[in-house]
Amino acid sequence: MNPETTNSETTRRIPWVAVALSFLSAGVGHIYCGRIFKGLLLYFAWFVIPLAVSIGALFQASLGTLIGLILVPSVVVTILYFYAASDAFSIAKASEPSYRLKDYNRPAIYWLLILVEIVYPVGLTIGAREYVFEAFYLPAKSMAPSFLPGDRVLVNKLASRKEFPERGDVIVFRNPQPTGGRVFIKRVIGVAGDRLLINGDIVEVNGKQLERERVPTESLDAVRYQIAGDVYHESQSGTRYQVMYGARNSGENTPESREVVVPPRSVFVMGDNRNLSRDSRHFGAIHVGDMLGYVDYIFWPAESWSRFGVYRD
Amino acid sequence: MTDERDYEAWLERRRTIGPPSGFANHVMASVRQSQTAHKISLVVRLALWVERSRVTRYLACSTALLIGSTPFIFLAYFAQLIVF
C-alpha cells in the first residue's frame, strides 16, 4: 500500500491532538498531520542512544567519547521529544481545514506506534545497561579519595568480557558476602599468581613494596571536605593512583599482617581508603567471573565538577 | 375497481421476483459498517468533549506527557539520577 495515497475523506487536524500524540510518542503527531517521513525519523530517534553508547564502549575512554557518544545523544533525544510536540502543534495549526486523510491516518496505527514506542526504548535501555554500560551510585567512602560518596560512575561491561583486569584497575564486582551491598567497587592490587604481603600500611607485591609519595593537602582542594587522613600517590605496574590512610573503623577487623598468593582466574582487591574498606583482606580474592566491569567515567561527581569525565588517577 | 386489480396484479408479479444476488451480504456489510462507525464516533465524541474546554485539553496533553515520558524516566533511573 502506498503510504502517500489518500482516500476521499477530509477533516481538519486538531492541534492539541497532534501535541498529545507527540507526547505519547515522538513522531506520531507528525504522522497524524500527514508528515510521515519526518514523523518516522523522530519516532526512531531513540535508537540513537543505545547505538551511540555501544560505539562509545568500544573506544578507549575519553572525554570526547563520554560527551559525544554517551551524554549528548541522551540530551538530543530528550530535546527532540519536546521539539516533535511543538512542531506537530505548528503543523496542525497551519494545516488546511480540508486536510485529505492518508491511508495511515487511522487510530489503530497511532495506538500501535505509541505502544511500540513506549516499550522498545525501555528494552534498548535495559539491553545497553546489561551488556554495555551500567551506572552506579557510590554511597560509601571506601574508595576515597579517588571516588567519593555521592559519585555516579559508568562501568564498562563490554571491556570486562574481553580483557583480564590488571593491577591498578578499578573494577566493580558482585559482593561475595551475604551481607552488605549488591556490588562493590575496589582497586586491583594483585592478579593471579601474585604473592602479596600486607603488613599494616605496607603493601608488597611479589616482594616489592608499593611506592608511595605524600600528596600535599593544597592539591586536594576539590575533595578535601571528604578527606579525613593522609593521602599518598601509590604506583604499581605503571599506574598511579591516590590512597588514603585515616582513622580505622572501630567495627572493622582488618588483619594486621597477611600473606596471600592470588589464585588462578582471581584478583586481589583493596579500597583506596585503606583503613575504611572491606575488601580482599576480609573476604579473599575475587573470581573474575564475579566482575561486572571497569570504571571508565565519573559522569556525575559528588563534590566538584572538576572531577567530571574520564576516571584518571 | 380497476386500480385495485392492477395493484393485486403488481403484488403478484413482485412475489415472483427474488431478491438480488448478494443481498444478504450487502445487508450484513452495512450492519458491520454502521457498528464501526458507531465505535469511531465514540472516539470522536471523546475528542470533542476534551476540546470543549482549555482545562480538559491541558489535562489530556499532560496525561500524554506523563505516559510518553516513561522511557525517559527509565533512562534517568538507569543513570541512577532518580531512585524508586
Image: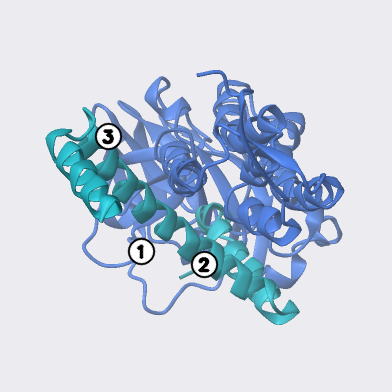
CB contact under 8 Å: marks 2 and 1: yes
Asked whether, in this view, residue A44 is left or right of residue A166, the answer is right
Instruction: Find residue A149 and report its image quarter.
Output: bottom right
| Distance CA(mark 1)–CA(mark 3) | 18 Å
Q: What is the number of the mark on residue A66?
A: none
The answer to whether dots 1 and 3 both sit on one chain is yes
Identity of the residue drawn at 43% across and 21% down: A163
Asked whether, in this view, residue A15 is left or right of residue B82, the answer is right
Identity of the residue drawn at 73% across and 43% down: A309
Chain B: colour as depicted: cyan
Q: Subunit of mark 1?
A: A
Location of residue A267 in the rendering, given as x and y in whole percent from the top left corner:
35, 36
> What amino acid is at disc 3?
Gly
Please tell me how many numbered marks the rendered image carries.
3
Location of residue A47 in the rendering, given as x and y in whole percent from the top left corner:
57, 32
Front residue of B52/A301: it is B52
Kindly identify which residue carries mark 1: A181
Kindly identify which residue carries mark 3: A289
Q: Subunit of mark 2?
A: A
Front residue of A291/A38: it is A38
Identify the coloring: by chain
Asked whether, in this view, residue A90 is left or right of residue A277, the answer is right
Identity of the residue drawn at 41% across and 79% down: A250
CB contact under 8 Å: marks 1 and 3: no
Kindly identify which residue carries mark 2: A139
Location of residue A176 in the rendering, given as x and y in whole percent from the top left corner:
25, 53
The answer to whether dots 3 and 2 both sit on one chain is yes
| Distance CA(mark 3)–CA(mark 2) | 24 Å
| Distance CA(mark 2)–CA(mark 1) | 10 Å
